């Protein structure tokens, strides 16, 4: 079921921020220099690479999907924070004589790009430069190759940091690093340190979510033990020039993130803001605590006692950072213009949980997002589903899948429809899984010479796309293509919408045929991967099927049925996600006998008030609902559509609703007070099914997501 990826990460951020404060204050020095070394010079070194990895967790999937367009806002935000922080500490630099040193322009350039314009601000140029390097690598190279390059950079950093004694003993290497240190003071920077951890976080973000089990905890403890041992050896043999980079540090961060992201905890964005503020403000707080202690004669208590000094800095930093956590971010109210769609995120999350609860162990919900998520908005629904724990999605075309990837959607994305050779670059670039429907189709894709993940579509009786279930030779031929990796098999049920005896017989026959094909292939020693048979009605009418790894849910995911007369055997508490609304622009008063609209299709039989509503068939509202076949809700009361629906507007008879005024909101699907107009009823009145009605809702209708809490 739902597992939160961010709750554990959010809760470790304050811990990491306090470890950074410990590095800069040495809280245990008054008690034991050796113990303080273990804490601040070894274990606390987890903090900054953790922050790098968390940044990469969000950044790298975006970079892989959208490239430079994802990097630019990251750089903009980072540069803004860096600039504000540099201004905050500029008076201290001025007081210390920083701006009076010889060769200031060159020193400013070095510090701005590598060392930081104040001693803890090195993080910002590091993460910004590291982000640029990772963007270049993941856009040009395979992920494994990019990781190898980052690992080489990290090793080069190690040789200029914790293992500098080895470097210093080899003249060519010594000369190389002496040249490097003319450009920056430490290899603890964005060139050597940040890229590996950014990429590590991004790689973990793309992996399937797993619970925080004992293996990760044991791995974390073991890696921390290795880190401590390594740190003690570095100290014992005087190897370090500086001791920020350790060989075992990436292993520690890997297990730490694996454990944290599997914790079933809700996200806490306020902890992110508080931790960042503590990181930025704590050096200022160190100076304030020391200044106040000296002024009050409390140096022995608040400076020389390093633990109390640390606690005082933590208290003051936390206090100054509190407003950043407590003041909620104001989100701009989305504009509701002429016509719009409202999406109830809480309803969609509810449906995900309800439908997931119907599935057996080992079977996962696959969200079908084709046709712009049945008109709901594919990007909006994908993001909500991801947060609800869904890790696989289905679309109709490679272009639809690429759109999701460019928006940062992770997990499996299966293209259900046919794709030609021209789609292969999209399939490769955006890591999509393509459906293969026949040996000819497989050979067409295989000739492109690019490795592709595929699912095989098996025709068990619908006779649409797919290879025949009883054509064993053709099924085996699909596996002969060297560039296609078979990751799953599936079929589609033709008559699962009803439970009539004939439809039940047809459906059960299709299920038996599918398992026969699976047994034929597995018996031949061929991999079968994920198996999936059911879509929404297959699940609701036949319950979960043992042995399947996926259930493809489309219309039910959005809280709807295809027609109001449908009564599936399983009737879970599903909630409609979509409401469709438009604005009243004008009121017209007609005398008896006057006409309105194209062809005078409406004739007033009495004194009549018509409301002009700003939505039409170009927005996807069917013209078939003209002349009273469709209705809208105004002030909680139904009003019939008058005359013919136009391209951009329609008229509604509001004679019985006297308070309607320009600017009022008309509801075409959804609730208004106690009244409800359902998508199923509107589709039936238009002579179609809900699926078609909604998937026609056009792109000029903005999708506004509500109920995010």
Image (cartoon, rainbow, N blue to C red):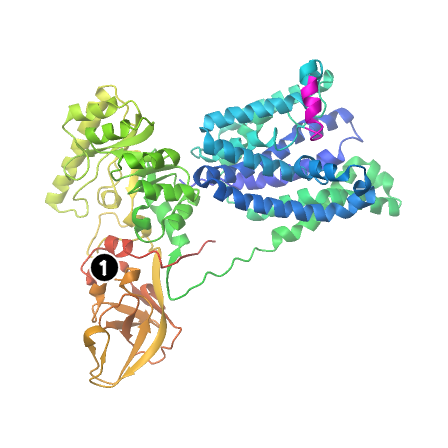
The spot of residue 304 in percent (x, y) is 84, 36
- Asked whether residue 349 appears in the rendered view, the answer is no
In the drawing, does residue 281 fall left or right of residue 327? right
Quarter of the figure with residue 241: top right
In the drawing, does residue 133 fall left or right of residue 103? left
Above or below for 445 versus 672: above
The spot of residue 227 in percent (x, y) is 63, 23
Q: Nearer the viewer, residue 401 or 666?
A: 401
In the drawing, does residue 437 fall left or right of residue 350? left
Q: Nearer the viewer, residue 652 or 161?
A: 161
Q: Please check the rendered image and state whether residue 636 is part of the magenta-colored stretch, yes or no.
A: no
SS of the residue under disc 1: helix
Q: From which residue to which does the magenta span run?
A: 174-186
Which residue has dot 1 on it? 683
Above or below for 309 versus 555: above
Mark 1 burial class by Cα count in 10 Å: few <14, some 14-19, many 20+: many
- Asked whether residue 511 appears in the rendered view, the answer is yes
Number of numbered discs on residues: 1
Residue at 17% in and 40% down: 464
Q: Nearer the viewer, residue 423 or 592?
A: 423
Quarter of the figure with residue 626: bottom left
């Amino acid at each position: 079921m739902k597992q939160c990826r961010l709750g554990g990460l959010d809760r470790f951020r304050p811990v990491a921020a306090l470890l950074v404060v410990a590095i800069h204050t040495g809280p245990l020095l008054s008690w034991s220099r050796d113990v303080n070394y273990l804490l601040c010079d070894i274990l606390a070194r987890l903090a900054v690479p953790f922050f790098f990895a968390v940044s990469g967790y969000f950044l790298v999937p975006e970079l892989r999907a959208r490239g430079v367009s994802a990097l630019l806002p990251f750089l903009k935000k980072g540069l803004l924070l860096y600039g504000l922080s540099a201004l905050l500490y500029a008076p201290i630099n001025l007081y210390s004589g920083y701006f009076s040193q010889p060769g200031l322009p060159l020193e400013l350039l070095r510090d701005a790009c590598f060392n930081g314009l104040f001693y803890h601000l090195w993080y910002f140029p590091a993460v910004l430069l590291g982000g640029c390097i990772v963007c270049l690598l993941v856009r040009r190279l395979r992920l494994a190759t990019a990781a190898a390059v980052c690992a080489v950079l990290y090793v080069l950093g190690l040789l200029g940091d914790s293992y500098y004694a080895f470097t210093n003993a080899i003249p060519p290497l010594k000369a190389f690093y002496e040249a490097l240190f003319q450009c920056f003071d430490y290899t603890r920077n964005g060139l050597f340190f940040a890229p590996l951890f950014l990429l590590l976080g991004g790689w973990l973000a793309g992996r399937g979510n797993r619970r925080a089990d004992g293996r990760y905890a044991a791995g974390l403890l073991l890696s921390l033990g290795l880190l401590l041992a390594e740190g003690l050896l570095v100290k014992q043999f005087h190897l370090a020039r500086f001791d920020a980079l350790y060989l075992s540090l990436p292993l520690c961060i890997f297990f730490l993130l694996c454990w944290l992201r599997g914790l079933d905890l809700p996200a806490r964005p306020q902890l992110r803001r508080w931790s960042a503020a503590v990181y930025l403000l704590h050096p200022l707080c160190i100076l304030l605590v020391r200044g106040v202690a000296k002024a009050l004669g409390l140096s022995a208590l608040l400076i020389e006692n390093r633990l109390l000094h640390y606690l005082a800095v933590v208290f003051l930093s936390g206090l100054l950072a509190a407003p950043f956590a407590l003041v909620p971010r104001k989100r701009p109210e989305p504009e509701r213009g002429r016509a719009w769609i409202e999406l109830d995120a809480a309803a969609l999350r509810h449906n995900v949980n309800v439908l997931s609860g119907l599935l057996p162990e080992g079977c996962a919900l696959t969200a079908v997002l084709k046709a712009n998520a049945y008109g709901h908005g594919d990007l909006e629904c994908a993001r909500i589903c991801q947060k609800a724990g869904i890790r696989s999605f289905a679309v109709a075309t490679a272009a639809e899948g690429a759109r999701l990837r460019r928006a940062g959607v992770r997990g499996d994305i299966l293209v259900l429809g046919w794709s030609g050779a021209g789609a292969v670059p999209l399939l490769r670039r955006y890591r999509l899984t393509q459906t293969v429907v026949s040996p000819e189709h497989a050979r067409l894709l295989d000739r492109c010479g690019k490795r592709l993940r595929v699912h095989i579509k098996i025709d068990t009786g619908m006779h649409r796309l797919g290879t025949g279930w009883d054509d064993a030779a053709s099924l085996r031929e699909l596996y002969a293509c060297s560039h296609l990796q078979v990751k799953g098999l599936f079929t589609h049920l033709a008559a699962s919408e009803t439970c009539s005896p004939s439809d039940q017989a047809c459906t059960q026959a299709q299920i038996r045929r599918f398992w026969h094909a699976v047994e034929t292939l597995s018996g031949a020693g061929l991999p079968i991967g994920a198996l999936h048979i059911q879509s929404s009605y297959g699940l609701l009418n036949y319950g979960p099927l043992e042995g399947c790894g996926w259930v493809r849910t489309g219309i039910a995911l959005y809280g709807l049925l295809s027609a109001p007369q449908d009564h599936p055997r399983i009737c879970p508490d599903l909630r409609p996600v979509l409401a469709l609304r438009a604005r009243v622009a004008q009121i017209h008063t007609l005398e008896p006998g006057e006409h309105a609209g194209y062809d005078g299709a409406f004739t007033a039989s009495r004194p009549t008030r018509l409301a002009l509503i700003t939505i039409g068939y170009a927005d996807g509202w069917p013209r078939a609902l003209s002349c009273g076949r469709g209705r809208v809700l105004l002030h909680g009361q139904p009003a019939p559509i008058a005359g013919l629906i136009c391209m951009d507007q329609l008229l509604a008879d509001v004679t019985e609703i006297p308070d309607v005024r320009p600017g009022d909101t008309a509801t075409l699907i959804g609730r208004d007070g106690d009244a409800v107009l359902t998508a199923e009823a509107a589709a039936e009145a238009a002579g179609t099914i809900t699926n078609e009605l909604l998937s026609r809702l056009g792109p000029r209708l903005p999708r506004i997501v509500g109920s995010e809490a």
